[in-house]
Image (spheres, rainbow, N blue to C red):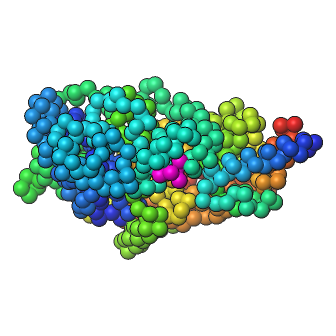
Amino acid sequence: MKAPIASESQLRELVIELLSHIAPEVDAGGIDPDKSIQDQLDIDSIDFLNFIMAVHEKTAIDVPERDYAKVATLNDCVRYLAAKAG
Amino acid sequence: MPSLGADMDAGRLLEWYVKPGDSVKRGDIVALVDTDKAAIEVEIFDDGVIGDLLVPPGETVPVGTPLATVLPAGTVVEAAAQAGPAETAAVEPASVETASVEAAPVEAAPVEPAGTPAKAAPPPAAAPPHAAEAAPEPIPESPAARPQATPAARNHARVLGIDLAEVTGSGKHGVITCQDVDAAAKVAEAAVAEAASREVERPAAPTGAAPTPAPPRPAPAARAPAPAAGPAVAEPPAVHVRASPLARRLAAEFDVELAAVTGTGPAGAVTEDDVRAAAGAVPSAPGTSRTPAEVAALSGAGPTGPTIPEAPEPRPSEPGDQRYAAMRRAIAAAMSKSKREIPHYYLSLNVDMTRALAWLEAANLERPITGRLLPAVLVLKATALAARDVPDVNGFYLEDGFHPSEAVHLGVGISLRQGGLIAPAIHDADQKDLDALMTDLRDLVKRTRNLQLRSSELSDATMTTTNLGDQGVESVFGIIYPPQVALVGYGRILERPWAENGMLAVRKQMHLTLAADHRASDGHRGGLFLTAISDHLQHPEEL
């Protein structure tokens, strides 16, 4: 978790953008960063896989299935990606 | 007008993609029809040449009304030469009507003083974009000219560097507006990622050799004159073939050409028995699977793409609220009919998923992220195989009893973000490997949520499945979608205590449920079916 702040905020922006593409009718920017993304945006496992694929596309970070629990909330997701990126 | 589900009484013809004289092949998308649920692409049942278009765009007609006549494929040249010019005139008013409707949100076609006499004359009639789409030859127009958009939107898109073909139109008939272009620009980056994933997705599909063992549906790309066949049958079958609705459904199901069947019913009408007899001679064919070429053509990538509209454009033809209200009514009608007529029985089985999930995790580790499988795919495949093992739950219950289906077309309940539900079918799910099923599932979810489905997907399902596990639901006891006889429910996969050999362990488990029609099967058979699904899931490597 030693990634620089700037990259974390960029990652946060990216994650929100990718989520709003998957759930366009929900304000992804307004979600509670400590609650489950899937529950708040009502996205199913296919949507979530599309999200993981989009993250991979943008950052080249591969989130393996066993780590899905570590990216369940916005804060966790950003921290996880920052750690992997850094 | 095909029945696109038990809840449909009538449909509105939105658009023709063919014109008299066009040769068509089974599986070609020939028209766009609006139902209460969505605008559906109607596929033709047989090879031949389009004779008359009997229903003009904009008209609402009851299910069973002939939409067009189809001439035998052998008459290609003559029909095209004679019927072409002659019929064009007859069809023209309809085209003008469509054009004027679309002209309201300012259509972008070059020749557009709506309703000018020039338009009614045959040669320029090919100029409006929708007519161009119907032309059998590739149009040497840039593809960007095809999506319908307002001139302002077109300019805007040019300025922003947005490809209109990638934009979702929210205007009437999916016409692209300035707001749509803005929205597209916003998500452009994400859309690029999406497009990339789509590219990766497609090669994973049953590429190359068509996977279906039985005669696969001819690819629309191959538009060469079809091998001469008997008088062909349109969707719905040609006017002159008298047949009961049941016979028609069975004929479609068994891939029997109605016109070739000798009718023994009243006034020579083809009856169910006639179709069965004919089907006995010709082994029933699961001829409904999509060929790769068809998939490609649908995305506009095929060489003869012009007959098919751009894939990424959803065509909601009503404002969202109205559509939702209509969909609720349609669901209400179908579910009420089901509960009124079908004596449901319900069974539940707790399935040990440990082995299947362990296999899946290992398999996914070896796959690129884009090839990753979801547990749902294993469960769907196991269900499809079990439907073959226990056919009592796979098929249709009609006036005269249960008709098991040899093909397994699994309906998949897909919830829409804006509310409502559609359950389109994955064709021949029992014969596809897991990668193909995953590709189909993702494609189906995407197209369903864009309201871009094809008629066979809505009318063919031989059994429906519903997965509410993502919502945390443990068990789902569903309502059967008539005339099907079973609905399979999947709950959430959870770790639970599991006792075996006097020992207690923690295992991942899933509640598997069945709602079945007691007229078609008994609890004993239903139980065998659930057990068969569970057994298949214990051998994931064989799925």
> For this view, does B73 lie left or right of residue B331?
left
Bounds of the magenta segment: B177-181
Q: Is residue B148 visible?
A: yes
Quadrant placement of the N terminus of chain B: bottom left
Up/down of B282 relative to B515, above or below: above
Up/down of B52 relative to B80, above or below: below
Q: Residue at x 34, y 28 (%)?
A: B140
> For this view, does B178 lie left or right of residue B498?
left
Up/down of B244 relative to A63, above or below: below
Of B231 and B172, which appears nearest the observer?
B172
Q: Residue at x 53, y 59 (%)?
A: B416
**Residue B176: image location, x then y, percent:** 45, 49
Question: Does the segment drawn in magenta span residue B295?
Answer: no
Main SS of the magenta part reads helix
Of B310 and B49, which appears nearest the observer?
B310
Quadrant placement of the C terminus of chain B: top right
> For this view, does B497 lie left or right of residue B449?
right
Give the residue furthest to the left.
B267
**Residue B180: image location, x then y, percent:** 52, 51
Q: Residue at x 84, y 46 (%)?
A: A8
**Residue B330: image location, x then y, percent:** 39, 67
Q: Is residue B489 visible?
A: no
Up/down of B252 relative to B346, above or below: above
